[in-house]
Amino acid sequence: MGKLVKHSYDVDLKWDEGRQGTLSSGKLNETIEVATPPEFPGGVEGIWSPEHLFVASVSSCFMTTFTAIAEYSKLTYEELSVAATGTMSNESGKFAITEIVLSPKLVILDESQKDKALRILQKAEEACLITRSIKTEVKLEPTIAIAALN
């Protein structure tokens, strides 16, 4: 077994008013306004909600994991975008985000690398530490395109 490694990520939240607050961290430059999503009583339109941040943590972890594995595997790509949709329901009588669908679109230059690219996308989804840390089902629906040569 490897050496135990621990990292901590400190986040501070300051309540502003109503159902709104501001997230910050002493180690980060930006703050994020957060609020109850508009689907709930007192919710606020146009501001990041905990639900958006939850889905964003899965998609951004997927992206950073993919870029690391692709670099290690020497996969060259032109573009990566990741659409992510989290579904919240009260199937069990209590609301929970029950599913997140990641739809990455990867643009590569060399069609012969398509299978390798797909394997790396799948490996990134499996290796993402946020996905491994949650009970929500995460589904991967990738698209790989070949860049047009000019």
Image: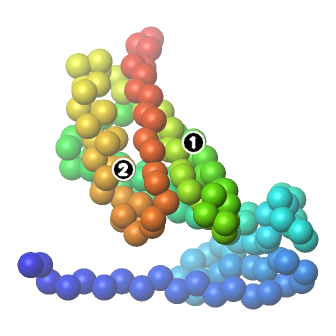
The residue at which mark 1 appears reads as 83
Q: Is residue 47 left or right of residue 141?
A: right
Q: Nearer the viewer, residue 60 or 93?
A: 93
Bin the neighbour count of mark 1 within 10 Å (Cα to Cα): few under 14, some 14-19, many 20 and up.
Answer: few
Answer whether residue 35 is visible to the viewer in this image: yes
The residue located at (58%, 84%) in the rendering is 11
C-alpha gap between disc 1 and disc 2: 14 Å
Q: Is residue 104 left or right of residue 16?
A: left
Residue at (29%, 21%) from the top-left corner? 110
Judged from the image, the secondary structure of the residue bearing numbered disc 1 is strand
**Could you say which disc has been placed on residue 61 in the image?**
none
Question: What residue sits right under mark 2 in the picture?
Answer: 125
* In this picture, residue 109 sits left or right of residue 42: left
The residue at 36%/64% (across/down) is 132
Q: Amino acid at mark 1?
A: Ala
Residue 42, position as x, y percentages in the image: 90, 71
Q: Image point 41% across, 60% down: which residue? A: 131
Element carrying mark 2: helix
Instruction: Say above or below: 73 vs 46.
Output: above
- 127, above or below 26, in the image: above
Residue 117, position in %: x, y?
A: 29, 33
Few, some or many C-alpha atoms within 10 Å of disc 2 (few <14, some 14-19, many ≥20)?
A: many
